Image (tube, rainbow, N blue to C red):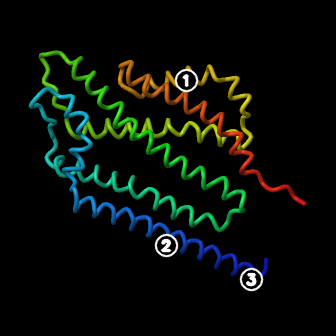
Amino acid sequence: MSDNNFMGMQESFISHLVELRDRLVKACAGIALVCAALFAWPGPSAVYDILAQPMVAALPAGAKMIATGVISPFLVPMKVTLLLAFLIALPWVLYQAWAFIAPGLYAHEKRLVAPLVISSSFLFAAGVAFCYFFVFGRVFKFISEFAPTSITVSPDIENYLDFVMSMCLAFGLTFEVPIVVVVLVRTGLLTVEKLKAIRSYVIVGAFVIAAVVTPPDVVSQLALAVPMWMLFELGLFVAPIFVKATQAPPEE
């Protein structure tokens, strides 16, 4: 390899690092701006109150959540606000990632990556929203009604945050089932016919996963397993269309 070629490769590598740095800075700046806006209005306390609403609504009248840590009343709302800022700024972050990799992709590869990035973001947000608006109210009501009368239900805010984050993550990831199906078919690892043949195993697996990641009540388990099954069927329907639309043009 000549010195000129080596220098050219080195300059190209450095330019890519500079571009990556700039994109990361822009992504972080977007998150910081959203976070600052949330701090200004409605504020970390109000943001946490919104997150805690499903739990508070299920508590006995007059009951509240508690904070056992010294700095928990300050630290936990700050964490929630930062996580919300990241979710709101996620389209901007994904755009920066797309802008970094897009110049090196062929046209058919762009048709492959862009829909996957957009749809996966939408499905993850849909899973989180489904968990918050539909599942939490039923889960917390079940837990509150099941608790013995000799117990005062007063959840700790840190434990509540951990539970909410794990549940939202579980639902967000399980809503990515159509993306997994499409990727498996597009990469040739499995065919649609093979996936249809193992449908019964997938359904059983959905209920097993739901039983593991959700509280031990039928409502929340069905609320996760049934959408997972339906999303698997959606993936089977979309995969052939997606594969046909993203195939490389035939060589002449």
Tell me which corner region of the image, top left, top right, bottom left or bottom right, holds residue 69.
top left
Kind of element beneath mark 1: helix
Task: Please tell me how crowded label 2 is: few (under 14), some (14-19), or many (20+) other residues with Cα within 10 Å.
Answer: some
Give the camera-side residue of 245 and 79.
245
Whichever of labels 2 and 3 marks the residue nearer the N terminus, that label is 3
Q: Which quarter of the rendered picture does the N terminus lie within?
A: bottom right
What separation in Å lies between label 1 and label 2 (alpha carbons)?
Answer: 43 Å
Image height check: is 124 above or below 226?
A: below
Q: Name the residue carrying label 2.
A: 22
Q: Which mark is residue 127?
A: none
Whichever of labels 1 and 2 marks the residue nearer the N terminus, that label is 2
- Amino acid at circle 1: Gly
Q: Name the residue carrying label 3.
A: 3
236 lies left or right of 176: right
219 lies left or right of 156: right
What separation in Å lies between label 1 and label 3 (alpha carbons)?
Answer: 57 Å
Q: Position of residue 233 (x, y in %)?
A: 61, 30
